Amino acid sequence: NRKQSKFEFANTIVTMIQSIDYTLILEEGCNDPIVRRNAQLMEIIKTGVPCSGHAPYGIKTPLQFLSGLEGDCDTRTLLLYTIFKHYNYNVAIINSDFYGHSMLGLNIENAVGAFKMLNGNKYYFWETTSKGFALGQLPRENGILNYWKIELN
């Protein structure tokens, strides 16, 4: 009804997801011995980040995320990917095993910033776990592009 451009609509949706508090989603239980041996996960949990365990493959489905509002990077990326595919956006999921992180990739006119190329398309990074990140803005701590791979488009 508001006649938003494709970019304005995408920005509205991503901003809403960015505003939801982060919850770490794990395949194991949050107090599982495997988790306790992982220094990176323990550091996140010790800072007070909520944890939700026993999720198959360590991810929640879009419906589970929307019903409980608990999600980490790959859960959020999957939800946004699903929404944007529904609205015929050229979208991708960009993952990094090195960083242990997942981001949305969006190919849209007049975008600027950091991107990955696939089949002649520029997929601009979009951080979904923190408020205020704009399309194409790659967090400094995740900034080496060679560590990122388009997993799904």
Image (cartoon, grey):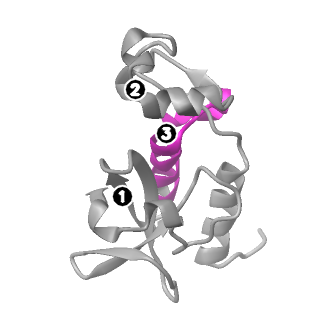
What's the distance in space between the residues labelled 3 and 2, CA to CA? Answer: 20 Å
Residue at (50, 17) in percent of width and height: 53
Is the C terminus in the top left, top right, bottom left or bottom right quadrant?
Answer: bottom left
- Residue on which disc 2 sits: 38
Element assignment for label 2: loop
Image side of residue 48 versus residue 37, left or right: right
What's the distance in space between the residues labelled 2 and 1, CA to CA? Answer: 23 Å
- Residue on which disc 1 sits: 94
- Residue on which disc 3 sits: 75
Q: Nearer the viewer, residue 42 or 82?
A: 42
Image x and y of residue 24, in percent: 55, 31
Residue 87: tell me if it is visible: no
Of the residues shown, which amino acid type is indicated by label 2? Answer: Asn
Do the residues bearing badges 3 and 2 touch, measured as CB atoms within 8 Å?
no
**Circle number at residue 142:** none
* Badge 3 or badge 2: first in the primary sequence: 2
Disc 3 residue crowd, few under 14, some 14–19, many 20+, Cα 10 Å: many
Of the residues shown, which amino acid type is indicated by label 3? Answer: Thr
* 96 vs 53: above or below: below
- Quarter of image, res 152: bottom left
Element assignment for label 1: strand
Residue at (53, 45) in percent of width and height: 76
Residue at (40, 26) in percent of width and height: 38
